[in-house]
Structures are given as structure tokens and as C-alpha cells.
Amino acid sequence: MIPFRSLTVRLLLALVVPLIVSAALIGIGDAWVTRRVVDYTSDRLLGGSVRAIAESVTAENGQVRVDLPPWAFGLLDSPQRDSVFYSVRQSGRTLTGYADLPDFDREAIATRGPVFRTLTYKDRQVRQSAEALRVPGVSAPVIISVAQTMESRTAVRGTLMTTVGLIEAGLVGLVALLIWPAARWSLRPLRGLRRRLSERSDARDPDFTPVAVDDVPRELQSVVVAFNTLLGQLERSVDGVRRFTADASHQIRTPLAILKTHLTLLARAKRPAADRESLVDALEAVDRLQRLIEQLLALARAEAAEADGRQEADLAACATSLVARWQDRATAVGKSLTLKPIAHEIRVALTGALVEQILENLIDNAVRYGGATILVEIGLEPNCAVLMVEDDGPGLPENLIRRPFERFSRGPHSEGLGSGLGLSIVKALAVRAGGEATLANISGSGLKVSVRLPQLGSAAA
Amino acid sequence: MRLLFVEDDKALGRGVVAFLRSEQFTVDWVTDGETALQQLAEPYSVIVLDLGLPDIGGLEVLVRLRRAGNRTPLMILTARDTLKDKVGGLDLGADDYMLKPFELEELAARIRALARRRGGDPSPVLTVGTLTVDRNNARAYVDGRDLELRRREHTVLLVLAANAGKMVSRRRLTGEIFGHDDEAGPNALDVYVGRVRRKLEPNGPKILTVRGQGYLLRIP
């Protein structure tokens, strides 16, 4: 079992998941760059304010003076209103500013230019910058140091990261939305192929011609070629079955003819009564075999769907002619056969020969096993024609009511020519035409066989 | 009535030939196509042909026979039951098509029907004056009196009656009543004609002899 069996979903996942992963990687890179850029600019501002203080340092008679300009901390103004601390020191002595601001004089003196560090001061994280200033006429360098809390940096970084994140999420969403129709578009040839194949399997007569490979996507060509190979094998085996029925019938007909010929010859001569009876029994058995072969062939041909002629017949006309044809045979065995009159034609989707075969089997069964009164009736139900043959005979035991449609099942007291195939032929033909065959005991006594066949539009149409 | 029966199955052939002989037919039975084609000079009334022959197929035999100008009525007797086979056989020049297994009575009736049609007269009974010859049950009557003819006698009378007033050659009559398997001396035909002539007396039509050439049934 494959997870995600829809190709569209698979395509979508295969494209969107890597997209999300790369968006995340880009996000991490962005965060790193953003942090670098924000730190760099903020540090430059911090350094700028150190510089501004340094500009105001003067020396008079070896004494250092600091005139803090009012704009010295303006550079550090921000909407977050960071706290700013400063100190000016010389040789470990605070000249002005916060005396407890931790110093890193030694690092500042060792470096030309500003130095920076991050530390905790008054329980808050601060960024501190310091610069050593050598004032002419003063022996020890003056160390200027400014520290600032981190609120504005964090805020700027947050704003930048949110913006970048939103843009990336928007992009991923947009691409995903565009991939959906793209995936469906790419899979459209697949749907076309599927439609063509399903049209075939819906067709009543199997079509074994290979599927054209030229107008199939290249990726599917091997599948279609495999499918065509399978079709070929199927066609050969269906052919084999058809040939087998033809061969079998041919092979069986000749020995039957031999049996029948010699038995007939023997029966013609004068013989003791017992011998004659045996011969008559043997001849009847041959007739039964012959009928069985013919029924088997009819069944095989119905199932193999030999498409010959128009798939259309008038049920009413077929019933009328068949009932007329069977009248004598019914009378001969003391049964009455009637057809309930029908005024209009009822067209069904089956060849006339097959409709007659259905009717013939049903009437034959009724005459053979049914009661004295046989009624053939044709009616209409929505979209289908119903053919009913009922008799007032003993009916069938309930446990057998489903079995007559099975091959070779014969009723409890059947004797004579019945092959046990009649009803299964009826059912096979009805099902092939898209209909059904049902069997029911009539309350009281009798049996009713109903065959429903798809109707081809009403007589008025 | 003489017919050619082409059937390769020995068991079926024996049965059918026995039956047809009992039905007053003179039957030549061959079991392959080549032999069948060699028999074409014989004056058969009907040919019964199986399709599945060992050497050349029955349809091929039929085609060659018709191409050679042979117009003898021909019935295909076969186990091939598809519509295609039936239509193909009839279209190639067969006059009837019968499926195995078959009822022997029906086979005989169809053969008789084919023979009648060949003579251009499809009626089952021939009448010449007081004489009526029944084609179907091998009987003949003069004024209602059954002549009680044997098989060959009936054939002789039937051929003469069908050509009443015209001379029928000895060769033709011999061909009609004797099959290949029959040992027939030069005077055998005269013996049969003599018997028929006697049975027609006193009030039936007369059979005249055209010395050395044939016989003629005179129309009264």
C-alpha cells in the first residue's frame, strides 16, 4: 500500500515540502545577516556618541575638562527609549558619569579606535563601547565609555525578522497555490487515457485493439505498451475459448451422428419388445445429449458476445410468433399456452435471435415441467421491459428457488430432454443485455419467471 | 436413384449407407476428396458431401466440381454449425446444408427432394397413362394395383417414366441402377427391364426395346 495514492497530492508534497525547507534555511540565513547588520549599525551609533564625548574633552594646565555637549546622546534616541550610561575616567578615577559602570580600560588602551562588549549592568543587558583618548599635555589617557540597554536593537531585529518571515510565508503559499493547477494540468493526459480505457470496459463487446501509444505521455508509454500486451493475451485467450466451443461442438457432433444413425437403423428392424425399449431409451439419451450440446454452445456464444446484427428486437412480435409456434406442442401434452395481448411494440436492446432463445427456453421449461395453464405476459416498468412466463404447476421448493439459474441443475422430478441449461442461458442472455432474470413461486401454486430487459425508448418515441 | 456419398468417418458412413440402401438408393461411398472428384463422370442424381475430409476440404471439392461444370444437386452434411460455414457452403454452390447429428428420415427426404428438383419436376408422383410412380416410397401402381417392385426395378421404371416417350440409353440406365461395388454382367440391365415389363402387364404402358441402344416407355 503506497501512502498518498493520489499523484496530484504526491506532486504537491514533493514540490511544497522542499520549498518550505529552503524557505526555513533562507530564514535562518536572514536572521544571521539581520543580526549582523543591526549590531553593526547600532555599534556605530554607540561609537559615534563616544566620539561626540571625546570631542568635548579638553586639557588645561594638565587638567582634563569634559564639556558634555547636549546632543552627545541624541544619536542613541529611539522609540524604545533605551537607558544610556556613560563615564569618563583617567587612571582608574572617574572624572564624570557613572562611577560604577564597569570599565574595560586596558582593552581600550590596547586598541586604537573603539572597542565593544556586551555585559550585564544594573541587572540589565547592555552594550558598552569605550575609546582611549590621548589628550596633548596630559600623561595618562582619558577613557570614555558609553553603555546602552538592548531594547531598540531587539525591536529593530524583531521588525526585520517579522517582515522577512511574512514575505517568505507569502511566497511559499503563493507557489503552493500555483502548483495545484499546474499539477492538475500535468496530469491531464492521464485523465484522458483513463477515460479512453474506461469507455472500452463499459462497451458491451470487448474491444481488444491496442491503445494508440503515440498520443500518450512518454512516461506512460511503457504502461500502455504493457496494457496492450495484456489485451493481446486476453484476446488470444478469448479466441481460444471461442475456438474451443467451435471445436468441441464439431468433435462431439460427429460421434453423436454415428450413435444416432446406428441406433435408428437398429430400431427399424423387427425386434423383441425389451430390445426396442432399450433402443428407444438410447435414442432419447442421444437426443438429450444433442440438445445439451446445442444449449451449451448457445450459452458459450451468448457469453462470448458474438456481435451479429442489430441489437434491437420487438419483444411483442417475438413473443407472438413464438407462442404461436409452440401452440401445437403445448396442446400435444395437454397444456394451454396463452399470450396476454399486447397492443404496441416494445423494443429491447438484444438481437431477435437471442430474444427468441430466451422465450423459447422459458416456454419450453413451462411446457415441460409446469402446470396445465401457461401464461406469457409482457409489460413495462420504468426503463425496462418485463417478460413473464407463469404456470399453475407445483412450483419449486424454497431451497431450490435460486438454483435453477445454475448450470445443470434440474428439478426434482425432471426426466426426458431437459439439459438443465435452459434457465442459465436465459440468465446469461438477460445479464448480457443489461437486464436480469428472477424466479418466484406464486402463492397457492405455480411458478413465475420474470426477465427484465432494457427498453429502447417507448413505441411513441 | 444413384448417389455419391463422400464421408471420411467409417462408422458414420457404414450406418448412413446401410440406411440409404434400405431406402432404395444406389449409393457409392468414397472417403476422400480426390476419389470423389474422379467419380464426376458418373450420372449421380445427388451428391452428399462432408466438409472435413482428410485430403482436400469438402468446400474445395465443391468448388472444383462446379468449376468443372458439374450441376448435380449437392448436399453438405457436416458438423460445422456456424452461420459463416452455412452461408459459405451454400454460396459456393451447394443446394442444401444439413448439420450432424441428423434424423435419417429427414436426410432421405431431403435427398429425394434434391433429386426431384434436378429433373425439373418437383412433384413426388409421376403419371404415365394408367401408371403412377411414387418417388418417395419406391412404389408404383397401375390402376391402383401395387406392382411390388424391387429397388432397381423401381429405379429403372422411374427413369423411363421421367423420360416417357423418349429413348433412354443403356449406359444411363446401367449407371442409375448399379453402384461401383455392384457386380453387373452385360445382361443384368435386360433382366431388370424384363421383370418390370412383366409386372406392368396387362394394362400398364409398354416398354419398347431399341436394340443395342436402350429402352423407351411408350405413352399410351
Image (cartoon, rainbow, N blue to C red):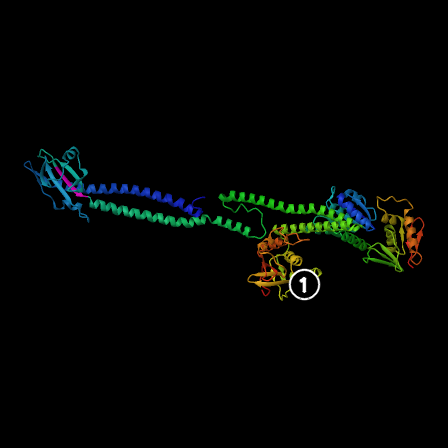
Q: Residues within 10 Å of mark 1 (few under 14, many from 20)?
A: some
Which corner quadrant holds the C terminus of chain B? bottom right
A110 or A459: nearer the viewer: A459
A347 part of magenta stretch: no
**Residue A175 vs residue A350: left or right?**
left
The residue at the far left in this view is: A61
Q: Position of residue B93 (x, y in %)?
A: 75, 51
- Is residue A107 among what the camera can see? yes
Type of amino acid at the residue the image marks with label 1 = Ser
- Is residue B99 among what the camera can see? no
**Residue A29 vs residue A130: left or right?**
right
SS at badge 1 = strand
Q: Position of residue B165 (x, y in %)?
A: 90, 56
A380 or B40: nearer the viewer: A380
Compared with residue A454, is residue A221 higher up or lower down, i.e. above or below?
above
Q: Position of residue A394 (x, y in %)?
A: 62, 59
Q: On the image, numbered disc 1 is attached to which residue?
A: A336
Q: How many marks?
A: 1
Quadrant housing residue A105:
top left
What range is drawn magenta here?
A143-149
Chain identity of mark 1: A
**Residue A428 vs residue B9: left or right?**
left
Q: Main secondary structure of the magenta part?
A: strand
Q: Position of residue B134 (x, y in %)?
A: 84, 56
The residue at the far bottom in this view is: A343
